[in-house]
């Protein structure tokens, strides 16, 4: 499957301590393994009261480290610490946080942690009052101050009946921060503007013209650019996706709103990736009230929307401009003419209806056309992998890359 994910082949130690959320670390392990990370689990004896080591062993395909005194386990804390590219503590209980803050080592996991030189991602999970306790806050601050990466816990209804902060962050968000920590920061210092999703052009308060764009490709691009260290602004039409972490998200509805947001943010952007499926037309008028079928005009009168990317192309200077095109036929011809007409550096095109590709799918098979007339067909990949492949190629057009 084409490009490797950021986590592929990386050695991750998942440290599990004894909190209710220990069951969620099973899902985290699955997520990391599905991106081909090599995950090994070190857990406390209390964690094993919630989830048995056998489950972690079966899912990771690796032995679990829990008992320093078991035969042949004596120096596992040193070997695993040395080999780790990243350590994730999920859940990190108040006790584990406190022990780390004081440099204590009285079991397998805490001993291993003292020997780690790789980044450590701490994902606290505990009762709200425990989390808000000044001593715990002090300890968390001490961890941050000494270079550990502490995630904010989620907020909501907790297993103990209290409501507030203390929930283990969503496993998908933890995996996302893991990828961010392991990703090379080749776009740091740059501003990347991404657009995503469809636009909606209202006919009346309850109806609109639109298209089935899910926004997944644009959101994957925004995530990947943020992982690579860029300052990222994502202008998105209406989609069912959560804001990517660390990204400024501007939600819009119509093409004209998207144009305003893009023109404002593009001024100081180094790279613009226009993955949005913008409606080229809008109804000439939008009725103030719901149109009634007996009275509605059966002819729809349309007005043209601005071509946002074409406008950016007119004042391109050394901004890298990347277009996207979903076509149903003549992929190369249509993509190449858009590339030229909009003055782009490259355009990423896919055929709608091809297996594993297009609207709503988690994978995509794209061809990339470049301004010098060269083109290449990429393998079928996840949209996250396509995003990195696109950024690799777009980065070649940055002025500092020439
Ligand atoms: N685009 C844009 N503003 C528009 C229409 C398109 O910025 N009003 C951008 C899209 O975000 C995409 C690229 O232009 O990056 C190509 O979009 P596409 O809809 O494929 O092309 P169009 O120029 O609209 O051509 P057509 O609809 O005739 O295929």
Image (spheres, rainbow, N blue to C red):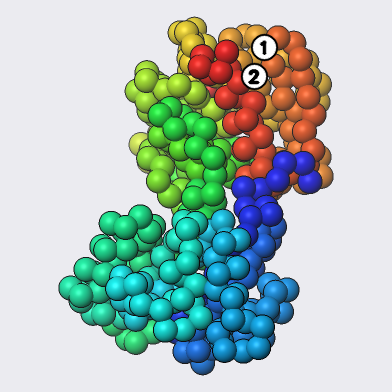
Looking at the picture, does residue 268 appear above or below residue 82?
Answer: above
Q: Position of residue 171 (x, y in %)?
A: 51, 65
Residue located 47% across and 89% down the image: 46
**From the viewer's perspective, is 190 left or right of 152?**
right
Q: Which residue is mark 1?
A: 371
What residue lies at 55% left-to-right and 69% top-to-bottom?
78
**Disc 1 vs disc 2: Cβ atoms closer than 8 Å?**
yes
Neighbor class of circle 2 (other Cα within 10 Å; few <14, some 14-19, many 20+) is many
Observer-nearest of 86 and 244: 86
Give the residue displayed 62% in from the left and 38% down from the top: 387
Report the front residue among 71 and 340.
71
Residue 31 percent across, percent down from the top left: 62, 63
Secondary structure at badge 1 equals: loop
Which x, y percent locates residue 56? Answer: 64, 79
Ligand 1 quarter of the rendering? top right
Query: Which of the image's four quarters has the C terminus?
Result: top right
- Quadrant of the rendered image containing residue 124: bottom left
Residue 382 location in percent, x, y? Answer: 69, 47
Query: Is 242 displayed left or right of 248 in the figure?
Result: right
Identify the residue at horizontal 51%, vertical 81% (top origin): 108
Dividing the picture into quadrants, the one containing residue 40 is bottom right
Label 1 vs 2, first from the N-terminus: 2
Disc 2 secondary structure class:
strand
Q: Which mark is residue 346?
A: 2
The reply to whether residue 270 is in sight is yes
């Amino acid at each position: 499957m084409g490009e490797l994910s950021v986590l592929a082949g990386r050695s991750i130690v998942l440290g599990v301590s004894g909190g209710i959320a220990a069951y969620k670390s099973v899902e985290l392990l699955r997520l990391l393994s599905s991106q081909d990370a090599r995950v090994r689990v070190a857990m406390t004896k209390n964690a094993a009261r919630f989830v048995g080591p056998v489950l972690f062993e079966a899912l990771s395909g690796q032995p679990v480290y829990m008992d320093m005194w078991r035969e042949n386990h004596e120096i596992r804390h040193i070997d695993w610490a040395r080999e780790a590219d990243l350590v994730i503590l999920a859940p990190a209980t108040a006790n584990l946080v406190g022990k780390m803050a004081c440099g204590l080592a009285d079991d397998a996991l805490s001993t291993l942690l003292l020997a780690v030189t790789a980044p450590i991602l701490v994902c606290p999970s505990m009762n709200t009052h425990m989390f808000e306790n000044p001593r715990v806050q002090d300890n968390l601050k001490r961890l941050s101050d000494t270079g550990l990466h502490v995630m904010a816990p989620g907020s909501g209804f907790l297993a103990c009946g209290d409501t507030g902060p203390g929930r283990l962050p969503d496993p998908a968000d933890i995996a996302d921060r893991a990828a961010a920590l392991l990703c090379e920061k080749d776009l740091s210092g740059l501003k990347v503007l991404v657009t995503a999703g469809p636009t909606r052009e209202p006919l009346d308060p309850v109806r609109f013209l639109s298209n089935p764009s899910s926004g997944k490709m644009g959101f994957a691009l925004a995530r990947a650019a943020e992982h690579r260290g860029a300052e990222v602004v994502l202008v998105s039409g209406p989609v069912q996706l959560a804001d990517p972490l660390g990204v400024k998200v501007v939600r819009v509805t119509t093409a004209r709103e998207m144009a305003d947001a893009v023109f404002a943010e593009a001024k100081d952007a180094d790279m613009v990736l226009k993955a949005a499926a913008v409606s080229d037309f809008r109804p000439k008028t939008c009725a103030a009230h719901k149109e009634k079928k007996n009275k509605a005009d059966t002819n729809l009168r349309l007005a043209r929307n601005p071509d946002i990317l074409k406008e950016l192309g007119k004042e391109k200077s050394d901004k890298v401009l990347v277009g996207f095109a979903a076509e149903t036929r003549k992929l190369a011809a249509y993509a190449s003419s858009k590339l030229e007409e909009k003055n782009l550096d490259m355009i990423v095109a896919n055929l709608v209806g091809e297996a594993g590709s297009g609207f709503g799918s988690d994978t995509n098979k794209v061809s990339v056309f470049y301004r010098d007339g060269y083109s290449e067909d990429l393998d079928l990949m996840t949209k996250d992998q396509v995003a990195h492949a696109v950024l690799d190629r777009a980065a070649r057009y940055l002025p500092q890359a020439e």
